Image (cartoon, grey):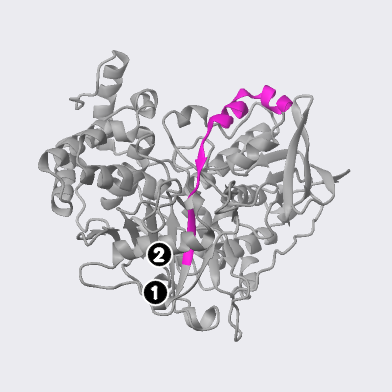
């Protein structure tokens, strides 16, 4: 075993991707640093930081640290950066001078309430964009709630209201009226169920932070909205459709605090009103090209220009601990090669929780009990399949939510947003003109074709079943949107293995949010003075497992590191979710009621 220092340049196995970014290198050198930031050259004695993981949280931490003059080395398991957000070339599909067909773990979307991640994206230069890679975002204007068995679909506009109410006009009764109006027009729910759901949202909107954390965190969304006592339509639209299909967690167990605060309030309600949004963004945005082309590759190039080193194809085995500090990290080549120990002044663990906690030994866990509590955090499968189509098939200018699909299927037609690409000219052999990217969020319920769960199916069976569920939702009302003869091929993340066998495995799972999850989530700062945590499982204000949460956690980890280092560098700005001032007086009243053991004013049972 050998020891190496994190500041020494390391080989970046497979870091170069043959993409459409040859001009990017000329743009990165002219980028200005954040106000108060110090360039690497301006720092005579650079402190070394080892960042463990090259996904969104790891790259975000490296970005903030490099701008502040730290010598950063990122250690990443895969040969390419970006984690679950990265693009992957589909092997053997390039022809005629085109690039390979683009594959991904699942589609990426960037809700308008994201504030931290967009700030980082603006600071990543991209040729021709004054706003950096942020300029590669495109607004999705509509969501399609597709119904199966020929039932009418629901088209839901995602643009903010053209004439939002004045700040003083938003009252509890006004909000209730808006919810009632939308649900009454857009759904077939019974009037009494619509009224009850509106009242439940009003309860959550006016609940104080203490009640949300002490009461609603312990109550499942399903129970909070009394879905078990309501119609199947109510359960599908307001229970399953808002939890399983969007964040791969079941309404029956999902925390009311998380679902209500992030999905209902930040994403939908305040998004439609244009409150707390990233500039003039609409509710939903996507990139204008495959994720790595539009974002990850330029990011890597920019970080290299700031002096960040990358060691890819490397597995983190154990974080060493002795004498009250992390003393080094034992790593090895992913293919089982030579083990070695890397050292630095500080360490940021930025791997997904299911991989990070496996590297924390008994002594490290004893030094900070919150590390042990991470064992209680739950993950689940949420993985996509990309279908390459012979015919342009946009379906809707936004995302598709197949509400009645047993596998909780969501999808998006991507080529319509890739306005800087010509799909058939730039990818594959020229036959594919579109890519329908679909995601399976429910892997444990029987499908409609084989009667088997997704985990029980082979890859080919999953593809056939998923295609059948998509057609069930989209081929109705006298139209045929998806045709078998249009499907040329498909791609699934190779991180999913063993399908159809006794032990299916998914290396890239997603943190889910059953009741009580909040109490097990750690802070970015640990009790070990040179060890910090970043990742979407870390406690953040955004709360939900998202790229925004990953970025926010990295900012908090860097700020904790700067505090531990007694650095005079500018701290990372952290944006929190929008808090409507109109609700604050009602929340203060609720805080008094909660302390007295009384229910929320609007909670009539």
Q: Is residue 256 left or right of residue 97?
A: left
Q: Is residue 523 left or right of residue 275?
A: right
Q: Is residue 379 magenta?
A: yes
Q: Is residue 544 left or right of residue 1?
A: left
Q: Quadrant of the C terminus?
A: top left
Percent across and percent down for residue 123 are: 54, 58
Q: Classify mark 2: helix, strand or loop.
A: helix
Classed neighbour count for the residue bearing mark 2: other residues with Cα under 10 Å, few (<14), some (14–19), many (≥20) = some
The quarter holding residue 595 reads top left
Labels 1 and 2 touching (C-beta < 8 A):
yes
Q: Which mark is residue 357?
A: none
- In this orientation, which residue lies closer to the viewer: 45 or 78? 78
Q: Which residues are magenta?
A: 362-386
Work out whether 272 lies above or below 484. Answer: above
Task: Give the residue number, with chain letter if any, for mark 1.
Answer: 484
Identity of the residue furthest to the top in this view? 596
Q: Is residue 458 left or right of residue 281?
A: right
Camera sees residue 532: yes
For image coordinates 67% across by 56% down, the residue present is 78
Percent across and percent down for residue 163 are: 19, 56
The quarter holding residue 410 reads bottom left
Percent across and percent down for residue 190 are: 12, 43
Q: Quadrant of the N terminus?
A: top right
- In this orientation, which residue lies closer to the viewer: 93 or 247? 93
Percent across and percent down for residue 120 are: 53, 54
Camera sees residue 49: no
Distance (Cα) linking label 1 and label 2 = 9 Å
Q: How many marks?
A: 2
Work out whether 98 lies above or below 507. Answer: below
Q: Classify mark 1: helix, strand or loop.
A: helix
Q: Which mark is residue 467?
A: 2
């Amino acid at each position: 075993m050998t020891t190496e220092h994190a500041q020494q340049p390391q080989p970046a196995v497979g870091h170069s991707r043959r993409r459409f970014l040859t001009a990017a290198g000329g743009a990165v050198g002219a980028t200005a640093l954040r106000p108060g930031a110090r360039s690497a050259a301006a720092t005579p004695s650079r402190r070394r930081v080892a960042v463990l993981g090259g996904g969104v949280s790891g790259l975000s931490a490296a970005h903030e640290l490099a701008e502040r003059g730290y010598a950063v080395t990122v250690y990443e398991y895969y040969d390419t950066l970006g984690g679950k957000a990265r693009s992957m070339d589909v092997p053997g599909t390039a022809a005629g001078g085109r690039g390979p067909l683009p594959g991904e773990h699942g589609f990426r979307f960037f809700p308008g309430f994201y504030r931290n991640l967009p700030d980082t994206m603006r600071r990543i230069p991209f040729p021709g964009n004054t706003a950096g890679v942020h300029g590669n975002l495109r607004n999705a204007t509509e969501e399609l709630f597709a119904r199966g068995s020929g039932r009418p679909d629901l088209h839901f506009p995602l643009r903010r209201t053209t004439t939002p109410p004045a700040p003083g006009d938003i009252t509890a009764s006004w909000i209730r009226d808006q919810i009632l109006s939308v649900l009454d027009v857009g759904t077939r729910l019974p009037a009494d169920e619509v009224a009850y759901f509106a009242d439940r949202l009003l309860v959550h909107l006016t609940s104080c932070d203490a009640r949300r954390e002490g009461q609603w965190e312990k109550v499942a969304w399903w129970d909070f909205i009394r879905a078990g006592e309501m119609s199947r339509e109510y359960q599908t639209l307001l229970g399953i459709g808002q939890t399983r299909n969007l964040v791969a967690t079941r309404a029956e167990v999902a925390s009311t605090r998380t679902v209500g605060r992030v999905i209902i309030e930040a994403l939908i309600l305040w998004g439609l009103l244009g409150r707390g949004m990233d500039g003039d963004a609409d509710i939903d945005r996507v990139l204008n090209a495959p994720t790595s082309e539009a974002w990850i590759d330029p990011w890597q190039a920019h970080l290299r220009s700031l002096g960040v080193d990358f060691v890819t194809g490397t597995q983190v085995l154990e974080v060493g601990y002795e004498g009250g500090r992390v003393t080094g990290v034992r790593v090895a080549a992913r293919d089982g090669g030579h083990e070695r120990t890397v050292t630095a002044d500080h360490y940021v663990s930025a791997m997904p929780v299911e991989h990070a906690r496996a590297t924390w030994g008994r002594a490290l866990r004893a030094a900070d009990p919150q590390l042990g509590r991470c064992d209680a955090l739950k993950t689940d499968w949420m993985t996509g399949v990309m279908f390459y189509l012979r015919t342009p098939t946009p379906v809707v200018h936004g995302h598709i939510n197949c509400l009645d699909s047993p596998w909780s299927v969501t999808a998006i037609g991507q080529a319509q947003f890739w306005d800087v690409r010509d799909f058939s000219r730039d990818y594959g052999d020229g036959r594919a003109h579109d890519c329908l990217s679909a995601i399976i969020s429910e892997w444990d319920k029987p499908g409609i074709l084989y009667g088997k769960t997704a985990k029980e199916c082979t890859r080919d069976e999953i593809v056939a079943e998923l295609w059948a569920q998509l057609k069930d939702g989209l081929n109705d009302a006298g139209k045929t949107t998806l045709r078998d003869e249009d499907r040329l091929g498909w791609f699934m993340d190779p991180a999913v293995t063993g399908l159809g066998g006794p032990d299916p495995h998914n290396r890239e799972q997603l943190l889910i949010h059953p009741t009580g999850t909040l109490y097990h989530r750690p802070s970015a700062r640990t009790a070990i003075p040179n060890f910090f945590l970043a990742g979407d499982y870390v406690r953040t204000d955004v709360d939900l497992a998202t790229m925004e949460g990953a970025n926010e956690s990295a900012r908090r980890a860097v700020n904790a590191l700067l505090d531990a280092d007694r650095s005079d560098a500018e701290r990372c700005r952290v944006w929190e979710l929008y808090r409507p001032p109109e609700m604050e007086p009602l929340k203060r009243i609720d805080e008094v009621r909660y302390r007295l053991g009384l229910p929320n004013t609007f909670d009539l049972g």
